[in-house]
Image (tube, helix red, strand yellow):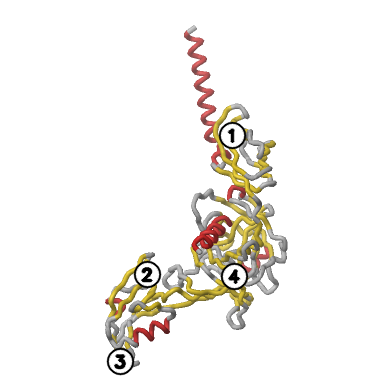
Amino acid sequence: MRKKTGWLRKIAGAFMSALAAWMVFSPTSQALRTLPETYRLNVGESYALNVGAAVLSSTDERLNLNNNTLTAKEKGESEVSVNLFGLFPIGKMRVQAGDEQRLMPGGEAVGVALATQGVLVIGVSDVSGKSPAQSAGLRAGDVIELVNGQPVNSSQHLVELVSASKGLPLSLTFERNGSKRTVSLQPTLDSASGLYRMGAWVRDSTAGVGTLSYYNPQNGTYGALGHAINDGDTGKLLPVREGSLLKADIVDVKKGQKGNPGELRGSFLREPVILGNIEENTNLGVFGELDKPYVNPLYPDGLPIGFQETVKTGPATILSTIDGEGIKEYAVEIVQASRQMAPSQKSMIIKVTDPRLLQTTGGIVQGMSGSPILQDGRIIGAVTHVFVDDPTHGYGLYIEWMLNAADAMDDAA
């Protein structure tokens, strides 16, 4: 009897070990690890989930489950059980269903012209053998906002305020890494010009080319670029005093190569056509309002958004303007999609597969940032960066991160 019991224990132990190994390494286990705690979908839409040998079930009548395909019949939050082989409960998942949100996808090349809030220090210099700015503790990346309590609105305005000091000490308030500081600065007479100077190179504006990501017809707002407008010398995010989104014509393309990112060269300042304003410059893009409704010629009825839970590896497309022929749709492949709890510019890795785009640009180039990414008839994100060592690959962020940033802007207003 003891011998038989021993064999039974060995068999049971072997079975449990095999089951544990299967749970760790099987496709089912791998699929279950990718399931989010909360899955979001639009009312009336269906999503097929890959859960291997597991079976999903729910008693909530607002949710229909058929062969692990979710269909939301009404708005609300439902609980879904995950059962191995349909018998053994191994987890739970929440499903949130809401009304469909539709956006007009972008893809149009745009110019961005930005005037900064205050003036940005890009370097210090000597005046008659010394640098008052450096002596006062200023350095590249600081944003000068006030001189003797008076707001500084341009580089020329700063020059005038310093020159008018006649050499008397000035109180300068500036921002550095999110904190305000105030210092005393003693201007020095420039013997060459006869003017008092502070010994600093400053900048109050910038301009460049990017791509419109989306237009929200419900409130007239837009998002573009998918990343911040940063100063080219200091890398600092430029605070917005005022800015304009402009119609851009692509006049030339510098093809991307390994180690040398390409570039779309656009014209938009000679005869500017203003499309809207720029209200916020954030790490997730620039945002504002358009002067009139925008319609994408390829998708005139707009498209629903796709949450990150619906994004999968495989075929997708991007919308971009790379020549004078307007917006075109190009094939890409999503090779990696991260599950993220916090906003990031690097939500997805995409690979350009369209021969037309590869022939013309070599892949992703500067100026294509903001190009909307589409998959399964939904707007899921926007292009943000190119891989410097491989222009056929780049990063994209989820569209929900851009929309969250736009909502935060509205709440602050």
Q: Where is residue 178 in the image (x, y as percent from the top left)?
A: 38, 64
73 on left or right of 160: right
Q: Are marks 4 and 1 in contact (CB under 8 Å)?
A: no
Question: 13 above or below 352?
Answer: above
First reached walking from the N terminus: tag 4 or tag 3:
3
Q: Which mark is residue 255?
A: 4
Q: Which of marks 4 and 1 is in front?
A: 1
Residue 385 showing in the rendered view: no
| Disc 1 secondary structure class | strand
First reached walking from the N terminus: tag 4 or tag 1:
1
Q: Mark 1 — residue? A: 82
Q: Are marks 2 and 3 in contact (CB under 8 Å)?
A: no
Q: Where is residue 277 in the image (x, y as percent from the top left)?
A: 56, 72
Q: Nearer the viewer, mark 4 or mark 2?
A: 2
First reached walking from the N terminus: tag 3 or tag 1:
1
First reached walking from the N terminus: tag 2 or tag 1:
1
Mark 4 is surrounded, within 10 Å at the Cα level, by few (under 14), some (14 to 19) or many (20 or more) other residues, namely many
Q: Label 2 to label 1, Cα distance in Å? A: 51 Å
Q: Nearer the viewer, mark 4 or mark 3?
A: 3
| Foreground of the two, 347 or 394 | 347
Q: Are marks 3 and 1 in contact (CB under 8 Å)?
A: no
Q: Position of residue 143 (x, y in %)?
A: 39, 73
Q: Which mark is residue 367?
A: none
Q: Do the residues labelled 4 and 3 touch (CB within 8 Å)?
A: no
| Foreground of the two, 118 or 207 | 118
| Foreground of the two, 270 or 410 | 410
Q: In the rendered structure, which amino acid carries the disc numbered 3? A: Ser
Q: Mark 2 — residue? A: 175
Q: In the rendered structure, which amino acid carries the disc numbered 4? A: Lys
Q: Label 2 to label 3, Cα distance in Å? A: 30 Å
